[in-house]
Image (cartoon, coloured by chain):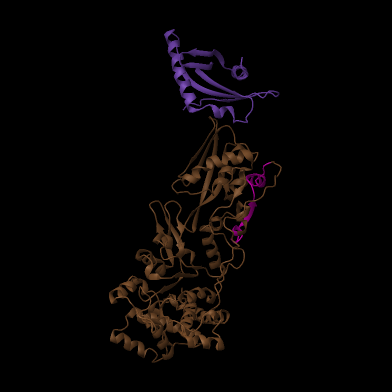
Chain colours: A purple, B brown
């Protein structure tokens, strides 16, 4: 496994732990369809939350949150629609949905920091 | 605290308005948005501020930063808002004291390395800040000297963004950097205008120059090439008295606006502007599509505007001078704003009598057709010449004059300036309690009223000229005005027949 994939996986695990500790319930992890992948899907109260996680080892090339572009968010929004359609086909109700972003800075020899932004897609 | 507030100044002409800069940090994906009618240079502040903060060790948050410049309807130009934007953002982050930032006016452009660059117009901006009640101004070190000229301003000079942040209470170690120098080297010495004693012969012209300086009259010199018109005109500023503090500050403010730098010494000398005759109307009065910049007539405020080869100027450019000649103010209107500039200058026009230049000379023959000759001087419009009190014909220096000049030596600038100062004092005492300071500003009604009446019988020649129709009523007033200046120079309480006669000569010579 390439180092960057390893870092990404670590970031996703850290993000998941951060969010579930905050009271969210994990529904899906690395959900895939033909159009791409959703990092995390969680339930926060009556809201379904789709999360894009971006991890970097340092901020030398900018904060990871800066790398979450409107294009990426728009794709996530489309994937969320796809996820909900499948869910509905299974006969389960969908409440409101929300899109969050999590930036993880995970330096090699220091504790990682997790930065969570709620409702970033407008 | 997620809201920061700082202040800056938007300049419009020589006037400035306080602009409030609000910065809001909201929890959204990192972005930097500037709203409130910014122009292109101001829109680019986004990138300069982000880079400068990063390179100063003051990282902006990885959040959405919205900067609002209000009043939103006021157009804002240029890069002077950079420092204010950075400070508002840092105040929103809580890096610096929000209270300290909100209480000061910030001016300065940021370099990507975090150093502060001086900007044009710091002096009028600081003056506007003080007028609006902001005593403290934070400026780049290179602009500190000119900012300090404004009475009542507490100037904080900062070489870098880091310095400014430390001033506002950021807990950082100071990092000394080399301050960026002022825009234009203000210490560049103006070329020495020369002394009046250099002028050989041309007694009448020297006399006319003295009258122009003493009374603030506009001057028109007509003569063949090589008669010394330019030489005479460039000597005029050396005859004018030093400027008072208020005028000197205004002159410095205009220099600052024009991006020319403000000299630290000898600021009280009246300016001298001599635009080339290809100048457009915008170059003369000022203009520009975005930032409205002062033109030559504005830069000559409180000094001398010299138009050499006046008929070669475009008629549009010349007639653009009629408004400032009348009101002493230039208002430049654009779709989104009107800028006001002070422009009470003394106009000196110089012209050849015809395209070949020899008309009226004794020694050479003019080759121009009468029509060409008429058309040449006809380019100077009547309404413009109507405002010029002194119109004088200058002749070429003869060999005899040259020989005699060595023996006697003419009037030198220092002596002439002393005479001018005495005459101006007399006029000031007489005009005390009126809105006018020099004879040139006095309206005809006052001249013909009881206060302005000349000696009994002094105006006989003048009245006769008026009756014969040689002189218009406006011309009559102009002769009286010049006669008063002559009386001031001659130490006479009122103009007598001698002064009126000489005034008539000084006016009619060119006609």
Task: Give the percent coordinates (x, y) of residue B129.
Answer: 55, 55
Query: As displayed, is residue B411 above or below residue B9?
Result: below
Query: As displayed, is residue B319 above or below residue B172?
Result: below
Write the start and end of the magenta stretch as one range.
B146-170
Query: In this image, B45 relative to B445: left or right?
Result: right
Query: As displayed, is residue B419 above or below residue B257?
Result: below
Residue furthest to the bottom in view is: B457
Q: Nearer the viewer, residue B423 or A32?
A: A32
Is B5 covered by the magenta stretch?
no
Query: As displayed, is residue B99 above or below residue B61?
Result: below
Residue furthest to the top in view is: A90
| Quadrant of the rendering where the N terminus of chain B is positioned | top right
Q: Does residue B334 show up?
A: yes
Q: Does residue A42 show up?
A: no
Task: Give the percent coordinates (x, y) of residue B328.
Answer: 44, 67
| Quadrant of the rendering where the C terminus of chain B is positioned | bottom left
Task: Give the percent coordinates (x, y) of residue A14.
Answer: 62, 19
Residue found 44% across the figure and 51% down from its top: B290
Residue B502 found in image quarter: bottom left
Query: In this image, B379 relative to A64: left or right?
Result: left
Residue A114 found in image quarter: top right
Task: Give the percent coordinates (x, y) of residue B130.
Answer: 56, 57
Q: Nearer the viewer, residue B4 or B280?
A: B280
């Amino acid at each position: 496994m390439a180092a960057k994939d390893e870092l990404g996986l670590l970031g996703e695990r850290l993000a998941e732990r951060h969010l579930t500790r905050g009271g969210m319930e994990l529904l899906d992890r690395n959900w895939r369809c033909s159009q791409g992948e959703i990092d995390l899907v969680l339930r926060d109260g009556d809201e379904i939350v789709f999360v894009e996680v971006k991890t970097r080892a340092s901020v030398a090339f900018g904060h990871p949150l800066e790398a979450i572009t409107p294009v990426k968010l728009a794709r996530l929004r489309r994937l969320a629609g796809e996820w909900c359609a499948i869910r509905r086909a299974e006969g389960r109700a969908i409440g409101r949905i929300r899109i969050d972003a999590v930036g993880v800075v995970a330096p090699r020899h220091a504790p990682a920091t997790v930065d969570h932004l709620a409702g970033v897609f407008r | 605290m997620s809201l920061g507030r700082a202040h800056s100044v938007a300049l419009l002409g020589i006037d400035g308005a306080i602009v409030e800069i609000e910065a809001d940090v909201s929890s959204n994906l990192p972005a930097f948005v500037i709203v409130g009618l910014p122009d292109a240079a101001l829109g680019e502040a986004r990138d300069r501020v982000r880079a400068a903060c990063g390179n100063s060790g003051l990282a902006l948050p990885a959040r959405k930063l919205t900067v609002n410049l209000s009043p939103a309807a006021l157009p804002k130009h240029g890069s002077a808002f950079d420092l204010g934007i950075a400070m508002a953002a840092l105040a929103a982050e809580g890096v610096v004291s929000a209270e300290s930032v909100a209480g000061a006016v910030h001016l300065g452009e940021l370099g990507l390395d975090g150093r502060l660059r001086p900007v044009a117009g710091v002096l009028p901006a600081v003056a506007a800040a003080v007028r609006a009640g902001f005593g403290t101004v934070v400026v780049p070190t290179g602009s500190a000297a000119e900012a300090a000229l404004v009475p009542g301003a507490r100037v904080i000079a900062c070489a870098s963004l880091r310095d400014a942040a430390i001033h506002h209470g950021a807990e950082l170690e100071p990092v000394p950097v080399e301050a960026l120098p002022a825009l234009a080297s203000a210490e560049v010495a103006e070329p020495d205008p020369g002394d009046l004693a250099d002028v050989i012969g041309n007694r009448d012209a020297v006399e006319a120059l003295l009258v122009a300086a003493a009374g603030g009259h506009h001057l028109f010199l007509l003569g063949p090439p090589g008669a010394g018109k330019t030489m005479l005109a460039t000597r005029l500023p050396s005859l004018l008295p030093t400027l008072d503090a208020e005028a000197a500050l205004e002159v410095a403010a205009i220099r600052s606006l024009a991006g020319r730098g403000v000299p630290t010494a000898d600021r009280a000398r009246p300016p001298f502007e001599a635009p080339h005759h290809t100048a457009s109307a915008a170059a003369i009065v000022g203009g520009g599509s975005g930032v409205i910049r002062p033109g030559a007539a504005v830069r000559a405020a409180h000094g001398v505007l010299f138009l050499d080869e006046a008929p070669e100027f475009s008629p549009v450019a010349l007639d653009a001078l009629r408004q400032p000649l009348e009101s002493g103010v230039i208002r430049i209107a654009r779709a989104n704003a009107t800028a006001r500039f002070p422009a009470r200058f003394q106009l000196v026009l110089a012209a050849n009598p015809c395209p070949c230049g020899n008309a009226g000379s004794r020694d050479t023959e003019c080759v121009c057709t009468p029509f060409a000759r008429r058309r040449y001087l006809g380019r100077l419009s009547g309404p413009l010449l109507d405002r010029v009190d002194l119109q004088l014909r200058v002749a070429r220096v003869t060999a005899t004059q040259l020989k005699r000049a060595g023996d006697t030596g003419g009037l030198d600038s220092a002596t002439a300036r002393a005479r001018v100062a005495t005459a101006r004092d007399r006029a000031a005492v007489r005009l005390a309690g009126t809105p006018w300071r020099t004879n040139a500003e006095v309206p005809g009604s006052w001249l013909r009223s009881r206060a302005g009446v000349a000696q009994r019988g002094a105006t006989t020649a003048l009245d006769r000229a008026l009756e014969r129709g040689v002189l218009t009523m406006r011309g009559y007033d102009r002769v009286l005005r010049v006669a008063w200046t002559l009386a001031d120079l001659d130490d006479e309480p009122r103009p007598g027949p001698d002064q009126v006669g000489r005034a008539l000569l000084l006016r009619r010579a060119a006609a």
